[in-house]
């Protein structure tokens, strides 16, 4: 519900689990400024009052401490801001005052950008507050959507130039929230094959910030931050999440001032952004989803999981069980032909695998990573029966067929580059730096976008293709375009172009399952999930490494989005030897698949794989859609554990990393089960939900390095 009290000058967005308060503050004769004064457990309208610190400062000093909802540079608010607006002489010249507001049922669509959505009007309510600058004519429409049964608020700002002179935006972030008190900052950092490690930085009176300026959200920092009260943990205490629905350059800053007030602001990265707003132009900033939890990090994650699984992901596959796939990348790399693929596919089909994915190397002259990106034409030297013949034979085995693309790239050794050397990002007169022997196509150009749409669509139309892996394997350098626009716009225009391409292709092929990828998990973000409901999590497929990666990823992203494959042992990235059981139990924590030469496995392992596949088929409704709770962190201990719960069953997975003599596994107490319910294990032993949560169980984990344990309780 959204209430507006004009007399007292506040807006209160609330439901049974959260309240967000925005207040208007009179600034002399100038007008009313918009403050965001509360976000947390539900309060009453009558509880809303201005914070007491407003009395202690003179007017100019006050600007450094006020909790502005849309802070702007240049006017005495020295903290990280949302907006930096220059007039035509280069002055930082804009100031925003309340003009009007509107309360709308449901949630408006964001033009050209990914965003969460409401399926009908009573699922959410949106407050749109228009602020305006009487001098330049700049308007900022600040939007806040509260979902009816969630502690998530989706926020964004739209900027409009209603004046007569062009303005330049040098910063246009998405949202700013202020919290009283000190907060630890948790973020997910990494690098290639080592994504989303959890790091908790204690509260500090400084600006802590994460960012990407690589053209993708990146392996280094995920566009997600959690703020935690110092006493908060996985299970208890107050936490906030900030997640940006965007796939390119971003910045999220957490600033604590000397009064112990914490400002959280995030959006496009001002380091690589500039935009000209001509009279009459609009600029839409991406959406940020901010979540409140009074139940620790797990409470926050569950809110994101629920919202992103059901109101960010879309389409035919959103609610469907995802197929168990086999991907040939780690089985063959570039070295395959029709017969070799069919050999793996036949074994996979016999074991019950449902989808065969042909990875890199099927097109142009691509026998290694030195050539052919952009030439999306099948290589019939390798695939003697073409894609059509291969797809037909794979379908004949009762499996679906999927294909890898890297459409945003071009190899300098390709027909595409020879025909259009100006189609890549480049700065005239500078070298074109290759990474993985490739250049980035200039997706800000409509002709390039159209080429990509047509090239990918032609293949998808040419034969039965049920799945696409959409890869992106390098960061931006030398960002320049022949598009006649302010060149500071190119990084964001690239992303808008890519989103257009994804919107066109995914709507033209609604039944195709799309999975995004960027050298593993280099673009695992909510923006991509809007178009493609699953993501390849990491190029590191080692089961133990994956415990950390999947644990970190689960902070913000639901299991149904996390691609997780059983690969070969010794593992190809780090040579670790693990059992097929351990590898299977770790992959069960995400979207399950295989990535090894199944036709070369021992008969014993093949028997185990067959059992694994039938177990996954039996459990995937629960592991894809059930409530996921982290129980033990590999970052803090020698064990990892998590549980999935739905109305049918409880699935508990526990993993030991290293074995020690005379050590026993810890007792695991399950969490958040419905009270008064009986559960039966496979030995017909019945336990109450109270027993599972309060007494717990000691998992029968082997005292061996890298061992896994699963226990399933069916609801009586
Ligand atoms: C990237 C992906 C891998 C694989 C290769 C193919 O690294 O993350 O899964 O598809 O490209 O070149």
Image: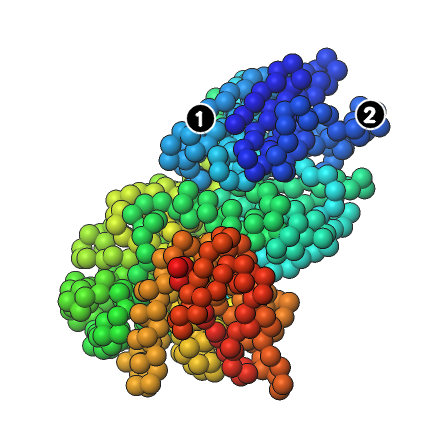
Residue at screen point 73% across, 39% down = 180
Residue at screen point 71% across, 41% down = 262
Residue at screen point 64% across, 52% down = 236
Q: How many marks?
A: 2
For disc 1, the marked residue is 105
Asked if residue 554 can be seen in this view, the reply is: no
Residue 695: x percent and y percent?
A: 58, 65
Along the line of sight, which residue is nearer the eye, 218 or 377?
218
Q: Check the image and report above or below for 379 versus 597.
A: above
Neighbor class of circle 1 (other Cα within 10 Å; few <14, some 14-19, many 20+) is some
Along the line of sight, which residue is nearer the eye, 54 or 500?
54
State which quadrant residue 341 falls in. Answer: bottom left
Q: Check the image and report above or below for 529 versus 446.
A: below
Q: Is residue 687 left or right of residue 333?
A: right
For disc 2, the marked residue is 55
Q: Identify the secondary structure beneath mark 2.
A: helix
Please identify, in this view, whether the residue under mark 1 or under mark 2 is nearer the observer: 1
- Would you say the beta carbon of the disc 2 residue lies within 8 angstroms of ligand 1? no
Q: Check the image and report above or below for 551 versus 567.
A: above
Q: Identify the secondary structure beneath mark 1.
A: strand
In which quadrant is the C terminus drawn? bottom left
- Would you say the beta carbon of the disc 1 residue lies within 8 angstroms of ligand 1? no
Residue at screen point 74% across, 42% down = 181
Q: Is residue 295 left or right of residue 59?
A: left
Residue 710: x percent and y percent?
A: 45, 71
């Amino acid at each position: 519900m959204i209430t507006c009290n004009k007399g007292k000058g506040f807006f209160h967005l609330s439901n049974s689990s959260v309240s967000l308060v925005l207040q208007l503050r009179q600034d002399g004769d100038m007008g009313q400024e918009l403050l965001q004064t509360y976000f947390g457990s539900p309060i009453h309208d009558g509880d809303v009052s201005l914070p007491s610190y407003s009395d202690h400062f003179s007017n100019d000093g006050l600007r450094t401490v006020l909790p502005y909802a849309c802070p702007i540079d240049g006017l005495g608010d020295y903290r990280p801001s949302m907006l930096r607006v220059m007039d035509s002489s280069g002055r930082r010249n804009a100031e925003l005052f309340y003009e009007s507001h509107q309360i709308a049922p449901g949630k408006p669509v964001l033009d050209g950008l990914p965003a969460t959505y409401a399926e009908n009007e009573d699922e959410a309510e949106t407050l749109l507050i228009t602020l305006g600058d009487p001098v330049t004519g700049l308007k900022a429409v600040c939007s806040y959507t509260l979902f009816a049964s969630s502690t998530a608020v989706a926020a964004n700002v739209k900027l409009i130039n209603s004046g007569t002179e062009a303005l330049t935006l040098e910063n246009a972030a998405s949202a700013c929230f202020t919290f009283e008190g000190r907060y630890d900052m948790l973020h997910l950092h990494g690098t290639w094959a080592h994504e989303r490690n959890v790091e908790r930085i204690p509260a500090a009176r400084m600006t802590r910030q994460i960012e990407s300026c690589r053209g993708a959200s990146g392996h280094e920092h995920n566009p997600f931050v959690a703020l935690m009260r110092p006493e908060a943990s996985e299970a208890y205490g107050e936490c906030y999440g900030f997640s940006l629905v965007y796939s390119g350059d971003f910045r999220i800053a957490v600033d604590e001032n000397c009064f112990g007030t914490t400002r959280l602001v995030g959006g496009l990265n001002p380091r690589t952004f500039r935009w000209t707003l001509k009279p009459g132009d609009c600029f839409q900033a991406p959406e940020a989803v901010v979540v409140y939890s009074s139940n620790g990090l797990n409470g926050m994650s569950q809110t994101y999981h629920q919202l992103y699984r059901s109101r960010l992901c879309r389409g035919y596959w959103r609610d469907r069980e995802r197929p168990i796939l086999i991907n040939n990348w780690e089985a063959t790399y570039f070295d395959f032909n029709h017969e070799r693929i069919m050999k793996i596919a036949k074994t996979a089909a016999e074991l019950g695998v449902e989808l065969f994915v042909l990875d890199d190397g099927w097109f142009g002259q691509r026998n290694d990573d030195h050539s052919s990106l952009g030439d999306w034409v099948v290589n019939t030297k390798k695939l003697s029966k073409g894609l059509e013949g291969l797809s037909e034979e794979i379908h004949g085995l009762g499996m679906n067929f999927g294909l890898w693309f890297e459409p945003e790239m071009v190899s300098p050794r390709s027909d595409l580059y020879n025909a259009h050397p100006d189609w890549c990002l480049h700065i005239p007169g500078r070298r074109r730096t290759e990474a993985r022997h490739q250049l980035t196509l200039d997706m800000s150009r409509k002709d390039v976008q159209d080429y990509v749409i047509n090239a990918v669509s032609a293949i998808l139309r040419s034969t039965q293709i049920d799945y696409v892996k959409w890869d992106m394997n390098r960061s931006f350098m030398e960002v320049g375009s022949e598009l006649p626009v302010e060149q500071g716009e190119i990084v964001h225009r690239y992303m808008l172009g890519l989103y257009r391409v994804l919107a066109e292709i995914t709507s033209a092929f609604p039944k195709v399952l799309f999975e995004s990828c960027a050298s593993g998990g280099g673009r695992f973000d909510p923006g991509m999930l809007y178009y493609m409901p699953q993501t390849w999590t990491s190029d590191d497929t080692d089961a133990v490494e994956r415990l950390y990666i999947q644990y970190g990823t689960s902070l913000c992203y639901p299991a149904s989005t996390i691609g997780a494959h059983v690969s070969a042992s010794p593992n190809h990235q780090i040579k670790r030897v693990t059992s097929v059981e351990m590898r299977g139990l770790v992959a069960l924590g995400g979207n399950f698949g295989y990535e090894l030469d199944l036709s070369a496995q021992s008969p014993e392992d093949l028997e185990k794989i067959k059992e694994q596949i039938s177990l996954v088929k039996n459990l995937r409704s629960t592991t894809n859609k059930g409530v996921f709770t982290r129980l033990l962190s590999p970052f803090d201990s020698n064990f990892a554990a998590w549980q999935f719960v739905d109305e049918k069953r409880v699935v508990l997975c526990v993993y030991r990393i290293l074995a020690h003599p005379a050590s026993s596994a810890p007792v695991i107490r399950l969490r958040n089960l419905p009270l008064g319910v009986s559960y039966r294990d496979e030995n017909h032993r019945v336990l109450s939900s109270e027993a599972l949560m309060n007494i717990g169980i000691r998992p029968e984990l082997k005292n061996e390095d890298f061992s896994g344990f699963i226990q399933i309780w069916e609801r009586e």
